[in-house]
Amino acid sequence: MDVKAALEWAEELIYAKTGKYLNDLERKVFFGSWQNLTYRQIDVDRAEYLEKDVGFHLWRKLSTALGEKVTKKNFRGALERSLKPQLARETNRKVFISHRLELPDLSLAMQFCEAIAAAGYQAYMASIAETLVELPTDNDQGGSYQNWPANIDAELQQCDYFLLLLSPQAAVSEMVIEELRRARELRDGRTNGKPVILPVRVNCSPTLPLNHDLRGYLEGIVQREWNSPTDTPILIKEMLSLLPQAATRGWEKAEPTPNPSQEGNRRQKAEGRRQEAGGKEQGCKIERSDNYLAGQDINLHAPPLPVAEPELPTGQVRLASAFYVERVPYEAQCYKEILQPGSLIRIKAPRQMGKTSLMARILYQAREQGYRTVPLSLQHADTGIFTNLNQLLQWLCARITRKLRLPDQVDDYWTDTYGSKDNCTAYFEDYLLPAADEPLVLGLDEVDRVFQYPQISDDFFGLLRAWYEEAGYGDLNSDLWNKLRLVVVHSTEVYIPLNVNQSPFNVGLPIELSEFSTEQVWNLAQQHGLHWQSSQVEQLMRMVGGHPYLVRVALYYLAQQQLSLEKLL
């Protein structure tokens, strides 16, 4: 330890005890004594004063700060001994990274993790797929964190910083919100303010409505914003600058200097937001280095409130809905698969089990990657369309063209020389796929309708299988067909006799959705503001099972107090 570092450490300790720094003469005595100089060698004219007054007060301050008797002879060793635990703590500082498993969250989390480790600190990447909240028992009055998986809770208790990568998907993830809730609870319950919470909004628009719980947990915490990979080194540099310091503060808030010509508009917009929020600040844009986002005041110890206004289920769960239940691990699998060239995902489940909602989120993930996406439900097709294959494929091409906002050229590609499958393939190969450099994701919902028409089903599904296989041939057209990604959704078993080599139902990624688990139903009840125990969840599930639609309808009416659980049963 050199004298400069020793003086900084001594002043930090003394300031923590007295609220005052050393004066110039005390620093002079400190420097001289560190070099083993006598008081006369330090200042020949004031040696007696330095020894009996300045030195006396300096060693007494250090004795108080270090908790042991300190003199001119032993102060150097005392300071070095006191600094060893601090150096160990600084080296062992740990960052808990809360993130989702899809891109860009995962990639960003890995870059943070690598940078933190390279700087000599520890990082823990929370795996959302592993974090399942257990249901509290009837006797458990302490909240869900008591049953939070032991390894996650242990890491949260030991970490110094909680780095939250808040993407739109993370904002509605029960697991991410529970990790944040626990981190906030630990921070607020400790005198050292650990873990320090560092939120980063990842492609998360400031206008995106956050649920009540999330706004409460983030209330008053400065945030940063990530919009592209160019932001990554800036955020990592700022993160690393925090680690060597005492872990008591988060992102710095620096108010920008407003442009005078824009100041009036800025104030007017801010006032409008305050009025819309009923006098409470609902949020503002988080720039990488200058703004912060504040949420509503929430009593964190009150019974749970609904995360949003209860919604009457009407089928597909909206993308922005706070009541969507994440399907672990299927979503992460689908989000990864849709990035693969020429991929095919087939989703199967009974009606109203969440198939269309999952498909919508897969397409959303694809759009976030810049892909073109077309959701297409065969329920929209008139019955007459299914009378022959030619009509069905012309309708399919026309609908996709309209969805992509391209000029309709179906008639130009349809000739009597070739069959309808050849015409349809040519339309994709020569027009739809080359129309842009980006991949095209086609989501086909309700393909069950085709099962009812055996005269066309074999050819239709054989065509989908042929397109899937085109991507793997390795010829000149393979790159083109690699741009096509298919998501096929159906409710029933494939009971029609399809050639095993021509069926799309035995290739690609199979996803079969199941009913909600008791944990998921309990979490959904909490989101509706119902402070239930396990027995109440079990009662509801004995009646409706874990059927997503029926569970949500029941919880809606219970949350609206239009019905009691006793009357429902």
Image (cartoon, rainbow, N blue to C red):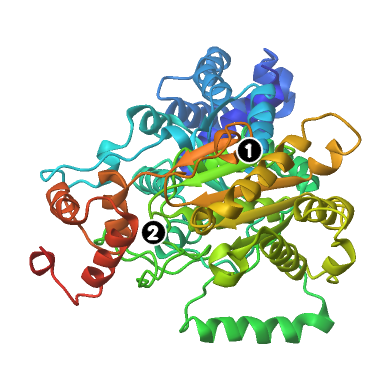
Q: Which element carries disc 2, helix, strand or loop? A: loop
- Residue type at mark 2? Gln
Q: Where is residue 143 in the image (x, y as percent from the top left)?
A: 24, 47
Measuring 67% from the left and 55% from the top, which residue is drawn there?
203
Number of dots carrying numbers: 2
Q: Position of residue 384 (x, y in %)?
A: 59, 71
The answer to which of marks 2 and 1 sits earlier in the sequence is: 1
- Residue type at mark 1? Glu
Q: Residue 352 carries which label?
A: 2
328 over 408 or under it: above or below: above
Q: Which element carries disc 1, helix, strand or loop? A: helix
- Tell me where residue 28 sits by quadrant: top right
In this view of the protein, which residue sits in the foreground, 42 or 508?
508
Q: Where is residue 247 in the image (x, y as percent from the top left)?
A: 53, 38
Measuring 36% from the left and 47% from the top, which residue is drawn there?
185
340 over 263 or under it: above or below: above
517 over 48 or under it: above or below: below
- Tell me where residue 385 sits by quadrant: bottom right
In this view of the protein, which residue sits in the foreground, 46 or 71?
71
Measuring 55% from the left and 39% from the top, which residue is drawn there?
498
302 over 150 or under it: above or below: below
Left or right: 542 with respect to 356? Answer: left
Marks 2/1: CA distance? 24 Å
In this view of the protein, which residue sits in the foreground, 508 or 118?
508
Residue bearing mark 1? 337
Q: Residues within 10 Å of mark 1 (few under 14, many from 20)?
A: some
